[in-house]
Each structure stands twice: as C-alpha cells, then as structure tokens.
Image (cartoon, rainbow, N blue to C red):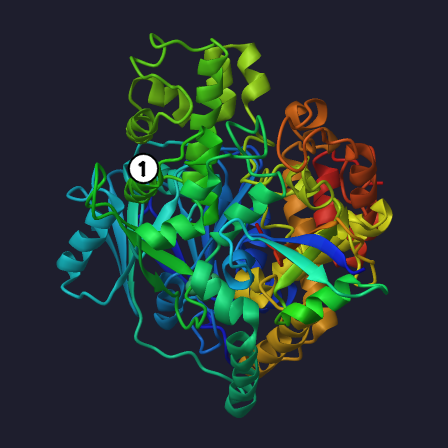
C-alpha cells in the first residue's frame, strides 16, 4: 500500500531541502506501518538547531505523531528573538 | 566585592550647561547590584532623572553604559546601552547598540558616561583617553550622520576614531530619532537621539588606546575559547546568522501569518518574495559585516547598482526594516526599502517607528481621514514608495505633514482627529515591530508589558513556538524566565543574538547565558559570579525599570494591546480568523509570575524586598504609589 503525503519547507529550509522553488515535496513511502515525524526527520538528516516546529495538518506535531496518507507536513526553521 | 578587571573603573560625568567634566570611580554598589549596560542605565535613570523632568529639558539625563565584557576578547562584546526618559513615550527609554563605539569607550578608560544639562550652542565631545574636550559643533549642525562622522575624523586628524552622532532628525527633535555609531549602527529606539539633540550635543567621538585588565587571564581565555567553539559550530550562529542575518524572519513571519502588512490590517503579504532574504541576496547584498570581535557577522551591507535608486549604499537591512518600510506600508519595491534605510541612517531616524507612523498615515489616507490637501500633495496610497521616501525627509526636517508625524502617534492623532486613534497601532506610545500578536499569541503578549513600550527584545525566547502549546500559567512563567535570560547579555555588554536565542537548542542558550557568561565575568572581574547571582541581577533590572515607570504614573491600564488585535480577525494567511482572545489570562499570569499586584501593576513589597530593592519600595511609597 504505502502512503503519499506532501512536505512543505519554509524560509531558509526551502533552498536547502527542496528542489522546487515553492519548497514543496511529494513523498511516497512504501510502508504499511506507522510512519512518524521522527522517521521523516531522519530521512532528511537535519542538523541540530535547524527545525523550529513541524505542523501536521495545521496542528503543531510532536516527533511521535503519525503521518497519514494525504497529510500535509509543514516544516519551519527554528526562530527566536524577532 | 571589589573588581580587579573587566571594568575600566571610571565614570565620566559631563555637565553641558556648566561645561564641566568630572571623573569618578565606578561605584561598587552599582557593579554588585546591576552589573553594567542596561543594569546601570536602569538604576541611574531611577536615581538621577527627576520624575517630573520633561524629556527634552536639561533636567533629563543621558546615560551611556557599557558592560564588564564590552571591549574584551569575549565574542560579540560590542554592546553599549543609552538610557534617558523617552521623548517618544514619556517613560523609560533606552536603546542598545553594537558596532565598535562601545569597546572604544571602554578602551579610553570609561564604563559610563553621564551627560546632564544643555549646551548653549551645538557641541560635540572628543574623548581621547584621559583628554576630554567639549568642542564647537556649529560646522556639523545640519549634517547627516555620515557627513558628521567624516568631518569629525578630519577635525581630529585620525581615521581610526569612533563616532556616535545624531542627524537632522535628532537636531530637529523628531521624537523617534536615534544615535548612529560607526555610520550604520543605531541605538534606534525610544528617541535617545532626540534627547541628545535637546542637549545640543551633536556627537561623541572617542579614541581609546588602553587595554582592559582581566583578573584571571588563563581562566578568561579558556571561557572565551569555549564560547568561541560553541558559536562557530552551532548551526544558528555559524550558518544562519552569517548567511541571512535577521532577514530570514521575513519569510517565516509571513508563513506563520503574522507579518505586519498594511498597518497590521493583515499578517500575510502576498508580495513577500520581492522583499525577502532571497531577493536581497540575489539583487543587492554586497557583503556581510560584523561588530567588534564577533564571528557571526550578521550585518548586511547592500548596494543598489541599477535602476531608480542606483547609488544607494547601506549597512542593513534588518528584517525589521524590510517589514517597517515594506509590507507594513504595502511596499514591495526592495530597492526603495534600501533607500529608506539609507535615509533613516543618514538622518538618524529609528527606521521602525518611522515606518510605523508612515503606515499609520497611509491607513488614515485610505480611510479618508487624510486627503492630498492634508499631506501637502503626497498620495499616501499603499505601496507608493516615492511618497514614503519623501515623507521620511519631511519627518526628519519637520516639514509640512512630516511635522505631524514627527511628534509620534499621540500628537498625530490629536492633529488628524480622534477616529485616527483606531489606526495608531502603538503601546505606551511606541509601535510594535513586525510580528502580529494574533498569529503567535503567547509569545507576542510581550508587547503589552515591555518596559520601553511595544518591544520585542525585552522578552525573546529560544523557540517561540513551544510557548504556544503550553498551559497559560506555565507559558507566562516561561515568558518571565526568558525575560530574565535575555537581560543577561544586556547587562554583560555582549550581543543578545549569539548569546541567547540564536542557538541550536534551549540547552545551548542556557549554557551560554547561565554558565559561560558568569564564567567570563568571574574570570574578567575576579569576583564570584554564578547563574543564580546573574539571574538575580536580571530580575532586579526588570523591577527597577518597572518601578521607574510606576513612579511616573504607569499602572496596569497602560499594559494593553491595541484594539485592532483584540477585535479584528486576521483576514488572510495562516492565522486567518484569529483575534487576540487570551489577553486577560496572559496578563494575570504574567503579573503573577513577576510578583506584581494584579490591580495596580506595581511590584509587590515582598517582590521588591526579595530583590533587595527596599530603598526603591520606600521611594515609591513616598511618591504615593501603593505597594501591597
Ligand atoms: S551577532 Fe550581529 S549584531 Fe550581534 S555582535 Fe555579531 S555582528 Fe553584531
């Protein structure tokens, strides 16, 4: 079966992790089990300090949240200050 | 405890009315109680400025303070703070500045400058180590900050001196004039350049050739190495800050639906790609620049080499400028934003408040409260960058309609009419910077309670998002905690960016602020310092600032958010439909976390006493301020 979902990168993560100028990537995984935010993060091999928050279908998501078929995962860089 | 290093040890007091120059030893009580920088300005503002003093009168005192680390080899040790009673807000005013001027002052042998009175004619100060002169500045009056800096270098015959000056805006007492150091570094907020102008003080030029003693050199070097290693290996300080400066926040705020657009009518600017960090880098970025001893080099240097604004050269912009002169005014012409930044630096204007009052005027124009006749022919439609640029000049020189805006929001509303008050987005007289509170509600509550008016730097957190998902009581505790953490660089004399929120994790921030800064101070000054002691000082500073404002009559009523945020839903962007609906909960929680009385907004007696501020508590009572 597998799953298909969209990952969208914001701000300076866009040019680093996406090949599309809009920062959107469609991900297809061949996995019937639970696929979590943490699994996704591992796939990208983010550097510590890069990721501020992950929003899964408009809700802030923890690492153990499960991504479902058709979901939208939005990845924002860290920010503080401003 | 007596210090053995870190501090230069001297205070320079200047009375411009009397043309008197006095040197004093830096008081150990001030060091122990307030450490330096914003700590010094807070206490001296309380002690030296009479509550009834008109901010533009000779009675107001301009205090310029460095910290124990300013000018040492600690990374990013560039900072100084300027404090006075603010002519913009009428309450506590201060502004923090980087560059090289603060370190030079320390190297000349001074931790603090205290400037009183008013010179009968325009003057500038020339501080050459021990030699201090009050010089005639009639040939400088009317010049821009850049011209002033060049002319003083010629006067002195030394190109390596450092100059902090005001431009025409400060001379003309525009209420939000800043002080410009090293051409492009601004002590921008709350009108400290206006206070300088009211004293007929055009500039302060410094040459310092002394080193700064360090009590335990090997301990200090070791601490410096540790922090250097952290800064040069952390993704945030080693890559994000140098590569983007603060400009990456533009995209981020917009994608979160909170980027102030058309005077806060919405939080989403659909033309963002024309003014964001990519557009800047691809078209105008020439170089990145760093302040004294800073590996992060976050300052942008931009040149416009084509088109209508060809020839524009500017140290900047910060994200804040891109918003203030861009989305907030509906302007997507990046070259014109750079030009606006250049003009503000040259005239010595706070680019933030300048953009804030222009956006306000644009909305009044849209709503028909201002017409072309009122503006002297200026078409203030959103995005009309020619009008924006012309208005900046008219504000600096207080010409025509520019004069209406030059006195700040309060006076402008009086002139335009009461209905315009709905569009004056300000708190305590100062505009919030860029980020709409409706889009990040917990974090941006900070605007309501900051001691210098709507401000984003009094409370800044590592990882602002997490605060949003905390329970309100816990979130307000965290806000208070972060308020104390980000005070630490301000009192130590180092830059907030690399020492606090630009870190790969909150743990790294804690390591820098609570472990390494105390270690740097302990080894530099040769006095005991630890995380608990430094947090106690930070708490004392916040309470002293609050007490200064309470003594001037500030109460809980002045801690508010503008109606627009409370009543209007954001019409577009990610936070569409949101309005600020947690104000009362946030306010109650924050007051409780700070130990302030819920009704009056005055710190409780117990809070003051715990912080060792019995004397201030007594003084407030003498002024009929009720302390419960
Ligand atoms: S981080 Fe930026 S603003 Fe701070 S000291 Fe370094 S160069 Fe200056």
* Res B136 seen here: no
For the N terminus of chain B, the quadrant is: bottom right
Q: How crowded is mark 1: few (under 14 residues within 10 Å), some or many (20 or more)?
A: many
Q: Residue furthest front?
A: A1
| A44 lies left or right of B378 | right
* Res B45 seen here: yes
Q: Is mark 1 within 8 Å of ligand 1?
A: no
For the C terminus of chain B, the quadrant is: top right
Q: Which residue lies furthest to the bottom in this view?
A: B218
Q: Where is residue A48 in the image (x, y as percent from the top left)?
A: 64, 71
Q: Which of B461 and B549 is in front in this view?
A: B461
Q: According to the image, label 1 marks what residue?
A: B336
For image coordinates 33% across by 26% down, the residue present is B391
Q: Where is residue B183 in the image (x, y as percent from the top left)?
A: 29, 53
| SS at circle 1 | helix
Q: Quadrant of residue B582?
A: top right
Quarter of the render that holds ligand 1: bottom left
| B258 lies left or right of B210 | right
Q: In which quarter of the image is residue B33?
A: bottom right
Q: Position of residue B361 (x, y in %)?
A: 44, 21
Against B96, is B511 above or below?
below
| B83 lies left or right of B605 | left
Q: Nearer the viewer, residue B106 or B249?
A: B249
For image coordinates 45% across by 68% down, the residue present is B296
Q: Nearer the viewer, residue B445 or B121?
A: B445
Q: Position of residue A72 (x, y in %)?
A: 71, 49
């Amino acid at each position: 079966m597998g799953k298909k979902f969209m990952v969208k990168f914001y701000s300076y993560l866009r040019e680093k992790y996406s090949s599309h100028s809009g920062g959107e990537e469609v991900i297809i995984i061949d996995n019937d089990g639970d696929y979590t935010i943490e699994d996704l993060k591992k796939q990208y091999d983010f550097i510590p300090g890069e990721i501020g928050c992950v929003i899964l279908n408009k809700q802030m998501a923890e690492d153990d949240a499960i991504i479902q078929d058709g979901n939208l995962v939005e990845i924002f860089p860290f920010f503080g200050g401003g | 405890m007596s210090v053995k290093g870190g501090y230069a040890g001297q205070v320079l007091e200047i009375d411009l009315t009397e043309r008197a120059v006095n040197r004093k030893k830096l008081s150990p009580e001030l060091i122990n109680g307030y450490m330096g920088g914003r700590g010094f300005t807070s206490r001296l503002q309380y002690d030296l400025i009479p509550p009834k003093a008109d901010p533009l009168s000779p009675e107001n005192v301009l205090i310029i303070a460095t910290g124990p680390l300013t000018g040492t080899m600690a990374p990013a040790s560039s900072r100084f703070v300027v404090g006075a009673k603010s002519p913009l807000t009428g309450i506590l005013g201060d502004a923090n500045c980087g560059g090289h001027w603060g370190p030079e002052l320390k190297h000349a042998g001074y931790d603090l400058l205290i400037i009183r009175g008013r010179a009968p004619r325009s003057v500038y100060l020339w501080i050459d180590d021990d030699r201090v002169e009050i010089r005639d500045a009639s040939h400088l009056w009317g010049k821009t900050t850049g011209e002033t800096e060049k002319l003083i270098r010629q006067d002195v015959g030394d190109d390596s001196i450092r100059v902090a000056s005001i431009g025409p805006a400060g001379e003309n007492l525009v209420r939000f004039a800043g002080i410009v150091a090293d051409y492009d570094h601004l002590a921008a907020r709350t009108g400290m350049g206006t206070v300088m102008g009211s004293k007929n003080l055009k500039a302060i030029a410094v040459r310092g050739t002394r080193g700064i003693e360090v009590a335990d050199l090997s301990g200090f070097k070791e601490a410096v190495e540790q922090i250097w290693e952290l800064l040069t290996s952390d993704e945030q300080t080693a890559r994000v800050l140098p590569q983007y400066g603060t400009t990456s926040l533009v995209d981020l705020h917009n994608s979160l639906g909170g980027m102030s657009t058309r005077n806060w009518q919405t939080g989403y600017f659909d033309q963002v790609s024309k003014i964001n960090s990519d557009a800047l880098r691809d078209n105008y970025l020439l170089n990145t620049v760093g302040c004294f001893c800073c590996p992060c080099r976050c300052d942008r240097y931009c040149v416009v080499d084509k088109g209508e604004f060809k020839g524009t050269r500017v140290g900047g912009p910060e994200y804040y400028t891109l918003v203030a002169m861009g989305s907030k005014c509906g302007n997507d012409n990046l070259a014109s934003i750079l030009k606006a930044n250049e003009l503000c630096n040259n005239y010595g204007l706070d680019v933030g408040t300048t953009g804030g009052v222009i956006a306000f005027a644009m909305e009044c124009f849209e709503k028909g409260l201002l017409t072309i006749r009122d503006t002297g022919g200026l078409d203030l439609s959103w995005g009309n960058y020619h009008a924006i640029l012309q208005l900046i000049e008219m504000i600096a020189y207080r010409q025509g309609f520019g004069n209406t805006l030059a006195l700040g929001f309060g006076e402008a509303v009086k002139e335009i009419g009461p209905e315009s008050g709905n569009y004056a987005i300000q708190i305590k007289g100062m505009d919030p910077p860029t980020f709409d509170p409706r889009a990040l509600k917990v974090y941006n509550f900070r605007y309501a309670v900051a001691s210098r008016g709507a401000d984003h730097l009094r409370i800044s957190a590592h990882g602002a998002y997490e605060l949003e998902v905390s329970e309100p009581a816990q979130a307000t505790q965290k806000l208070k905690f972060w308020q104390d953490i980000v005070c630490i660089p301000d009192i130590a004399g180092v830059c907030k960016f690399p020492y606090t929120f630009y870190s790969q994790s909150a743990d790294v921030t804690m390591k820098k602020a609570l472990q390494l800064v105390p270690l740097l101070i302990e080894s530099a000054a040769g006095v005991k310092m630890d995380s608990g002691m430094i947090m106690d000082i930070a708490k004392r500073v916040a309470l002293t600032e609050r007490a200064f404002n309470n003594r001037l009559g500030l109460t809980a009523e002045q801690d508010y958010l503008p109606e627009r945020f409370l009543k209007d839903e954001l019409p577009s962007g990610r936070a569409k439909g949101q309005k600020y609906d947690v104000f009362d909960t946030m306010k109650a929680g924050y007051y409780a976390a700070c130990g302030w009385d819920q009704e009056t907004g005055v710190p409780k007696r117990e809070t003051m006493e715990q912080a060792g501020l019995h004397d201030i508590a007594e003084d407030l009572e003498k002024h009929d301020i009720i302390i419960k």
